[in-house]
Image (cartoon, rainbow, N blue to C red):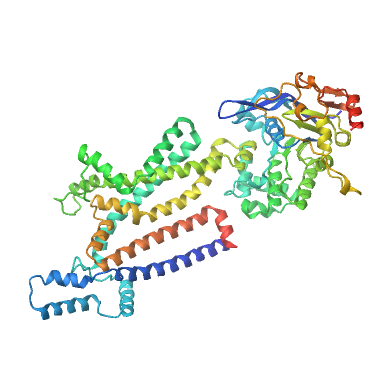
Amino acid sequence: MKGYQEYFLRKLGWFLITFVFAFLLNFILPRMMPGDPVAVITQRVTQGMTSQTGVAKIYQEYSELFGTNKPMLEQFFLYVKNVSQGNFGISFSQYPRPVAEIIKSSIWWTVCLQFPAIIVGWLIGNTLGALAAYLKGGFDKVIMPVSIFVSNFPAFGMAIIMVVIFATTLKWFPISGGYGFDQIPNMSWTFVWSVIVHYQLPFWSIVLISIGGQAIGMRSMSIYELNADYVKYSRFLGINDRKIVGYVFRNAMLPQVTGLALSIGTMVGGALVAEIIFSYPGLGNTILKAVVGQDYPLISGVTLIITLMVLSANFIIEIIYGIIDPRIKATQAD
Amino acid sequence: MSNVMLEVRELTTKYVTRFGEDIYAVDHVSLKVEEGKTLGIAGESGCGKSTLALSLMGYYFAPLHYTSGEIIIDGRNISGMNPNDVRKSILGKEIAYIPQAAMNALNPTRKIIHFIEDVIKEHELYITKKDIYDRARKLFETLGLSADVLQKYPVELSGGMKQRTVIAISVLLLPKVLIADEPSSALDVTSQKMVIKMLRKLMETGLISSLIFITHELPLLYNVADDIMVMYAGQIVEHGNAKQTVFDPIHPYAKGLMGSIIVPEKGLRDVKLTAIPGVPPNLKNPPSGCRFAERCKYVQPECKTHSINLNEVDGGRAYRCIFSEEKLREAYQNG
């Protein structure tokens, strides 16, 4: 088990290094955006005020509150200290709500939408790909072109198509939101039902997109493995076909596990777009509002959380990968 | 006369391509291997050696298909058997196979011992893991392999080690016939030697009763085999004992093939190796007459129209040529 321990520590090391860099970028990038967000808030609050000294005073107060009047380095250490205590500061655009609270209220929407969608899409896609490789013939001839077609849709395109078909034309599902606009979040059945109904379109739009790519990848990997030398050899030793298919799909799965890590990575990019289109109350929408409102504590907070999620997902998958594929361990241990 | 372990009569198999064309890669091949003997099969690449190896197993899967002929292993005809019965009671137990690319013959994500468990459980239902382990360990030790190998993944073994592990796994169930398809190609010379030694040991210790050794390396074949068969374009063109076939071939193709061996001796620098011009015919539409006619120095017009039979000569030899033995020898004398 020594080799595995080394592999684990190495991966953990890389995880931490990546996290530190991501953290730094997270702090610096929003502060490099053009424009003065404090001025924007001051302007909003002081609308109609004529006293120049009054405006300047309010500007100064806000600067103090947000810490923007301090030197960059001091701001950074203050930020590190606060973040470590779970304090991401106060939102500019939704003043005076703390960033932590905004994230807390939206993160579960995103996690509950994206993770199941990605996992379901991955499972369905891989099953279809494996079947297409094994059954060949007509099944393959249908699955392949459909997969290629579907996987080339951008996330927003798929979302809009779903809205047009199922919401506007068929009126089966609501157009947008996480729950009915006339509801207040509680544990009643009407609310839960409303959440379920609103969940369907964004969920399936993400699932459909991930199915295609996974199916194509799994199909070609399976075909490659089915023709591998060990398949022929195992057959000639009398091992039954079902067991050989087991070998083949287990080996074909390995690169697909990386695919899973990557699609969790795309959560930040592609799939967040679906959230925005459906006005889903998740992180995607929050980050959009934050960018529009030049709300850098909120941007930093959200991107930090997303970075942490993606890095952790990748870390966990690499750890699992080391367990299921002996070759990875062997090459990394050298 | 000792027991015949494997007898093959007029075996014909074909590949069916994606476009539905039939390619007869093994065409009416007959052979016999006696107990304790090694049969060598020689020929250049693409002449059907490996396909013959696959066909001899009696278990076919696409794109290879059985057409006609009989395979008799130790008196038991397996040609008409249900494929599932062949799989359970013949493969590995009666006849076993060592693949050409042993490097990739093991499932990369399965420990050697787990793979061995899969193999044995397929043939013996009531056997415990411990018994399997003991048997595998004993076999490995007999063959000079460390028992530690059992607990390893294929990726942790060197090339030569993998090859020897594959050989050991192939003989787990003590097959009567072992078919080794170029077991030593792609190995360095030292590993090659170890593989050959191991194959010899299998025969000496009685783990196998007969061996079919396929290679294009003729000097190696001469060292290992008792009898040699030369294949060309899916057919046997010459058959005889090793010494005669290598040093005194009858068929023009065998003659050409043996002429391409380098013999390290004095004056080697001045010796020009003779190569056979051309390539083997495409078996999609094989020539109607002699298949070697296109490349033969001594070709006659009727070679291309008549199909040629295998002529038996004294001493259990046979060759496939329109000329008589004397006439061929005369032609070789005159260059």
Is residue B74 in view? no
Q: Quadrant of residue A42?
A: bottom left
Q: Quadrant of residue A100?
A: bottom left
Q: Is residue A38 found left or right of B8 in the rendered image?
A: left
User: Residue A135: horizontal and vertical position, in percent?
Assistant: 49, 33
Q: Residue at x 47, y 57 (%)?
A: A318
User: Residue B297: horizontal and vertical position, in percent?
Assistant: 82, 30
Vertical side of B330 occupied by A314: above or below: below
Q: Quadrant of the C terminus of chain A?
A: bottom right
Q: Is residue A60 found left or right of A322 in the rendered image?
A: left
Q: Quadrant of residue A169?
A: top left
Vertical side of B180 occupied by A276: above or below: below
Is residue B177 in view? yes
Q: Nearer the viewer, residue A132 or B245?
A: B245
User: Residue A34: horizontal and vertical position, in percent?
Assistant: 27, 69
Q: Residue at x 19, y 72 (%)?
A: A39
User: Residue B192: horizontal and vertical position, in percent?
Assistant: 76, 48
Q: Residue at x 25, y 57 (%)?
A: A285
Q: Nearer the viewer, residue A331 or B57?
A: A331
Q: Quadrant of the N terminus of chain A?
A: bottom right
Circle count: 0
Q: Nearer the viewer, residue A127 or A157?
A: A157
Q: Is residue B134 found left or right of A301 in the rendered image?
A: right
Vertical side of B317 occupied by A227: above or below: below
Q: Residue at x 31, y 54 (%)?
A: A272
